[in-house]
Amino acid sequence: MAENNQPAAVYAALKEQAEQNRNRLFEKPLILIGAATCGRAAGALKLTQAVKDELSRLQLEANVVEVGCMGHCYAEPVMVIYNEGFPPLAYGNVNDEVGVRIIRDYLVDGDPGFEFALVALEPNDFFPTFSDFPRGVHENKIVLSQCGFIDPQNIDHYLALGGYSALVKALGAEPDAIIAAVKDAGLRGRGGAGFPTGVKWEICRRAQGSPKYLICNADEGDPGAFMDRTILESTPHALLEGMIIAGLAVGAEKGYIYIRAEYPLAVERISLAIRQAEEKGLLGANILGAGFNFAIEVFQGSGAFVCGEETALIASIEGRAGIPANKPPFPADAGLWGKPTIINNVKTFAYVPHIINNGADWFRSIGTGTNPGTAIFALAGKIESTGLVEVPMSTTLNELIFEAGGGIAGGKQFKAVQIGGPSGGCLPESALATPIDFDSLVGAGAMMGSGGMVVLDEDDCMVEIARYFLDFTRKESCGKCTFCRLGTKQMLDILERITKGRGEPEDIDLLMELAAKVKEGSLCNLGKTAPNPVLSTIKHFRGEYEAHIKEKRCPSLMCKDLIAYYILPDKCERSCDACVGSCPAEAIFSNEDRIKVIDQEKCVKCDSCKVACPPQYAAITKLSPPSEVAAREQREGAK
Amino acid sequence: MTDRITLVIDGKTVSAVAGEMLLWVALDNDIYIPHLCGSRDDQEKPASCRLCFVEVDGRPLPVTACTLPVSEGLVVRTGGERVDALVATGFELLMSNHRLDCKNCPANGDCALQQIAKTRKLKLKPKKLPVLERDLTVDDSVPGILFDPNKCVLCGHCIKACLRDGNGILGFTRRGFERVISTFGDLPLAESECSGCGSCAAVCPVGAWSAHLHAEAF
């Protein structure tokens, strides 16, 4: 019994110390600055420096902590201030000037600057909280709950809020009981395929072969996806705790985090988290004195998208070229160095501590029967409030885009939503009632993928979108198997032909046939899913393909070869020549009426004139097909 | 102890060692299945040419014969609407990237691509797909060996042969459509450690590698 009590006792001491350390932060005003990659891109580091300089100039005592991202990327840089007298407030779009002003007004004059505040973090009489906004109503944060609120570089923050308590619980349980809990919870792999995590763990636990390995797939490569990066940068210990518990469950003593080298900050923060967990005895030999050893090593991928495929990922760690192999054998039977290996996504591992702590029933109470829990999406594209959202499975696309995401940016018309990255599909307006879960999205012709969601509006050409994604998979194909190597190349050539106005009537059928065969014949899931953007855009937006092919017209005015720029004579302001100066090709001249006219022969369609034309005139428009220009000039009398 | 089992391929009952891959069992019983990349002794099956698809009772999707271990009662068809269409497209894709010059090709008459076309009644010249010429440099730097990468179907037999008989100087390089077989650093064969053994030419199924006589030899 004494042995069983040891982890709990060691943990209690660690937690108490952590609480003391964290509580000390609140003895002075506490300023949190969202300094994950998204915040830094928006100027968070500059803001941090400005805030620190201002504090020292004013000789004010305050704690400034760089935290991760709370998901509201549209409002970066985000700053949070905990100060007496008011509830903690989060401020959005805080550039360094605004930041300095808030510090001065709030900490010196006692004015919290509500005009800059985004949201209050606790219920109060002054200012709305997250639950007062549609996004907060729809969100149910489990994995992301601490992102942006704790210091990812200080393990005490995670510990003080109960972090690693699930590990203590797991250390006192039988491995089979841990697996049973994950199975009962119905957790499905969040990398995209949705395979039941508990079943995978059980196969690995029962598999012959020793030692066993654990791999966290953090090779997040879909364009527009940044869920895993945010977790790594904002709450790295949640991942570590999930991995240690998984190691305990399947009987592995070594885990790898395969993370793309393009995520330097994530690499830095997860590496620091590993060192801190080791120092506290939560990772390494004889964890919390329970006799269980588990080590975690960070392995940096070199930028090949295909290394997100598990067999290619394993080959890459083994030092071979990252090229997929035939399955079976599956990694759970024969993976890294031929040994039973569990590969799970970052998010999958990050759910595990919550399931162990709160139980399978709790997890099942969120989402639906076959898709329990939450879904984490990276909202990107033409959406008002970009960022990360975590909503219960079964939330509809409509709710996610128009309520949680605030609708389409700039008052434009929704056209489609691209889900699942280059492996996913584009869904039209008619599919907006689709609930978000693994099975419904596949049924609708897209896929959950790892959680990238790109919203497209009326200005996006669906043929060009298909071409863009296929260009991506064509470049990222490893080239091993015939269908993917040559099929993606042939399909891309056809799509390029269509976007350049050289499409043939039979091209749509040929594309569909090739797409079906590449899906069926490819060796790995990169090839098997690469045609999805093509198939889904043809299915839902066939009319756009036909306009490109038959009329040589791009309805969204996006495909350069099918459009021309035109200056509306009745809108052009004679005395203004902003467009003339902006044109790099000297293609714009004034006619005898001093109306500007574009020489179509010289125009390179760079869009500079349209940007330069003052909004009060908005005289420059795009026409498709280009022959429209001559017709309009005839009609409108410009020469 | 090897368990012998019986299975049915195209209506013919055959006997085989349990666990052997279907492709080799079929070939041993004079049932031809198109294939380019596999070898019987492969440690890791490449399964990359994607031409040996068969239909298996109880499986909803076509399966590659080179990765399907045979078992008692297995019922397999090497043809069928779905498999035929899949193989036809895979073959056309390969042919869209194979420089077709049978008349002058040393493999003419003994070429795996000709064999597949003949047995499956497929055209060597792509019907629907445009030909993707890459115009890669032909390597004839080592006497007795000629490598025309424009004909290569990336089956990898030369790499295995070179490891076995030569100095193991060949490998796959680059990726996607640019994937090729080459020496380390893309050196011409003569500047690599090529032993000149010619095993590559002996195993190449499509005439990309061939035994070659230099003009000076005459």
Image: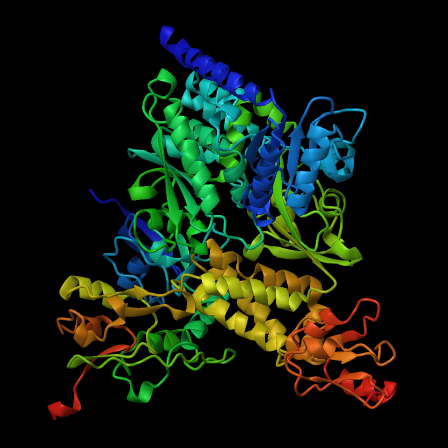
Q: Nearer the viewer, residue B186 or B100?
A: B186
Q: Which colour style is shown?
A: rainbow
Which quarter shows the N terminus of chain A? top left
Q: With respect to residue A181, does A441 lie above or below?
A: below
Outermost residue on the bottom side: it is: B218
Residue at 43% in and 80% down? B123
Residue at 41% in and 28% down? A276
Residue A493 drawn at (x, y percent)? 53, 74
Which quarter shows the C terminus of chain A? bottom right
Residue at 28% in and 81% down? B138
Q: With respect to residue A92, does A409 lie above or below?
A: below
Residue at 35% in and 36% down? A213
Q: Which of A553 and B91 is in front in this view?
A: A553
Q: Is residue A108 left or right of A497 when viewed as pictured?
A: right
Is residue A501 among what the camera can see? yes
Residue A216 drawn at (x, y percent)? 43, 39
Res A558 → quadrant = bottom right
Q: Which of A45 and A161 is in front in this view?
A: A45
Res A439 → quadrant = top right
Is residue A563 among what the camera can see? no
Residue B216 drawn at (x, y percent)? 13, 91
Q: With respect to residue A589, does A334 lie above or below?
A: above
Q: Nearer the viewer, residue A322 or B28?
A: A322
Q: Is residue B106 left or right of B98 when viewed as pictured?
A: left
Q: With respect to residue A215, does A295 lie above or below?
A: above
Residue A572 drawn at (x, y percent)? 83, 77
- What is the total number of numbered labels drawn onto the structure image? 0
